[in-house]
Amino acid sequence: MPFQYQDLIHLFAQTFHAQYNTLLVCGEDEPIYLPAKAPHLAHRIIFAHGFYASALHEISHWLVAGEKRRLIEDYGYWYEPDGRNAIQQKEFEKVEIVPQAIEWALAVSCGFSFDVSVDNLNGASVDRFSFKKRVHTQVLHYLEFGFSARTTQFLKACQAFYQREACQVEHFDYA
């Protein structure tokens, strides 16, 4: 099955628009979350360049953000662009473990390939394997103790649409 970002836009709207007044939108530049503000009546999760993986990643950030954070542009989080030094990269990875674990589960639920994003091509060297292991540990935690209600709702929507079984430990290999 080819992966079309339009499917994610539709699934997200079908699952969350009525309750959370939030839309998934294809953007042409960097991803961003924008709360509702005239002339836009809905909150918007804008993902980059029509990339399916970017849509999954931005959805995962929305799934992590609490009610108050969803009223702030980009959820009020710090972001240092590509070119981070070693300290900045460690901080980036620390805050990315949870959303990337959720993104991995979403990818599995869609049958889509996943790899962690360290997002620092022009900065300090990165140990991708170590980062992926920490993301993997977080996924295993979620599989044992459960995902949030919104995350579970979207995982099930993806699994139904893509005709995939529920996430199991064996679906997640960090090697």
Image (spheres, rainbow, N blue to C red):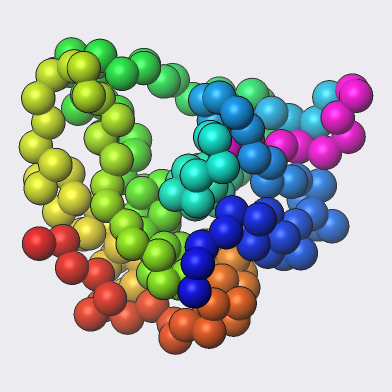
**Residue under the point 38% across and 77% down:** 167
Residue 139: % across, % down: 30, 62
Q: Quadrant of residue 160?
A: bottom right
Residue 97: % across, % down: 30, 45
Residue 4: % across, % down: 57, 59
**Residue under the point 30% across and 30% down:** 119
State yes or no: residue 118 in magenta. no
Q: Quadrant of residue 120?
A: top left
Residue 55: % across, % down: 53, 47
Above or below — where is 5 with respect to 37?
Answer: below
Above or below — where is 23 with respect to 167?
Answer: above
Q: Would residue 145 be visible to someone looking at this image?
A: no
User: Bounds of the magenta span?
Assistant: 38-47
Q: Would residue 63 be visible to someone looking at this image?
A: yes
Q: Quadrant of residue 26?
A: top right
Q: In the picture provided, is 39 more to the left or to the right than 87?
A: right
State yes or no: residue 43 in magenta. yes
Which one is in front, 61 or 49?
A: 49
Q: In the picture provided, is 112 more to the left or to the right than 158?
A: left
Q: How many marks?
A: 0
Q: In the picture provided, is 169 more to the left or to the right than 153?
A: left
State the quadrant of the C terminus.
bottom left
**Residue under the point 9% across and 37% down:** 127
